[in-house]
Amino acid sequence: MRLFLVSVSIALAACHSVPSDWVSGTVYLVAVGSPSEVEMMRAEQILGLLTQRPVKRMPSRQLVPAEEHPHCPSKAPCYDAGEILDDLLRDPPTDTFRIVGVTEAPMSAAVARDSIAFARHHERALLYTTASFKQLNASSAHDRTRQILSHELGHTFGAEHCRGPCVMQPRLTEHATIRACPLHRKHMVEGLLQSIDSGSFLAAVGRERSRLGRWDEAIDAYRRALLRSPNVVEVETALAVALMARGRYLEARDVLDRASYYSPRSPLPFYARAGLYASQSAPARAAAHLESGVNRDPNASHAHRFAGVLYQDVLRDDDAAIYHYRLHLSVGGRDPEVLGRLAMLLAPTTLVFTEPEVVVVQYDNEAGLFWAHAGWGE
């Protein structure tokens, strides 16, 4: 029962020491709807073992009336897992390490039909349902819940799915392991070691609050992250974006100037400035900063895709957008959105990349977008 915990604890003891200012935080457990008390007690015990943190119950939350979700596995109504997850994150306690929802309702997510569990990378909430659970004896049921919680905690620590014998394998089976493979063990160890007062944790909270549109909370989290880990260009740029979302443009500009001073080769502050000047109806200055960002970006495919979208959607410069979309393709990019956008701007068109690869793309106002991919001799 404690195999996963023991293996992680050994790794922690062997490789890391806990700093004196480490703050553990609390794991909060929430009944969403009416899950069984047996399952809630099981989850509470397992979370304490896995995280080595206090686990506290929060008041239960009622499910809103179910509607037919577009990704439900059947015509029967089910709940949107992403919406439940966001509801858990609306106003979490300030000492939250993770908040865990348990429900008995069927749920689904846009990324997977008939979801058993759901979590987003580097966010603090995770959720699972007992809707499709088979009756098992106490020991097997305990193992199943442990597998689910270990897997979803891994996602919150940034771990992807794994094809090998690993707790991150995508499907829950009777023979699923509770061990993390070497590739994902690092995510587990570092995730479980996190202090909720560390710069990386607070930066992740800032991204979480930004996604939810809680800009003031995001700004506070980013500023606290930078107090602990100064001059991190990714965090400084994210802070500037959050300030812009609140209309605090002068503060955002000061943050971006500081970011460029300490990280002059980073494209991120220049991309953010492009957005800042575009929002202030200064397209020439926005374009200049955008090109400066592209010239600094080591990922040419991503840079030209981003520039094309910004030129087309924000700066309303279709010629510049076409130029960057073609550069995206010339450096090996094959983003379907870029193909679609080029087709709409140049319909009909034939895009020739490198021999023998030919992609024919056409956009028709009535039929929409269609393309055909052909290799040499086909």
Image (cartoon, grey):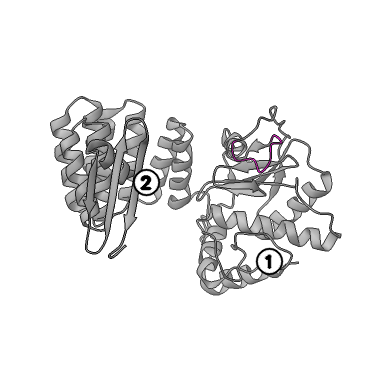
Q: Can you tell which mark lies on residue 226?
A: 2
Q: Quadrant of the N terminus?
A: bottom right
| Residue plotted at (63% across, 42% down) | 108
Residue type at mark 1? Ala
Q: Can you tell which mark lies on residue 176?
A: 1
- Direction from residue 237 to residue 170 in the image, left or right: right
Q: Nearer the viewer, residue 96 or 43?
A: 43
Q: Counting other residues with Cα less than 10 Å from the Cα at mark 1, is it few (<14), some (14-19), or many (20 or more)?
A: some
Residue 188 in magenta? Answer: no
Q: Nearer the viewer, residue 315 or 361?
A: 361
Secondary-structure class at tag 2: helix
- Direction from residue 313 to residue 224 in the image, left or right: right
Tell me if I can see residue 262 in this picture. Answer: no
238 above or below 248? below
Farthest-out residue, front: 377
Q: Quadrant of the C terminus?
A: bottom left
Q: Do the residues labelled 1 and 2 touch (CB within 8 Å)?
A: no
Q: Magenta segment range?
A: 70-77
Tell me where residue 269 appears, x and y as whole percent. 25, 43
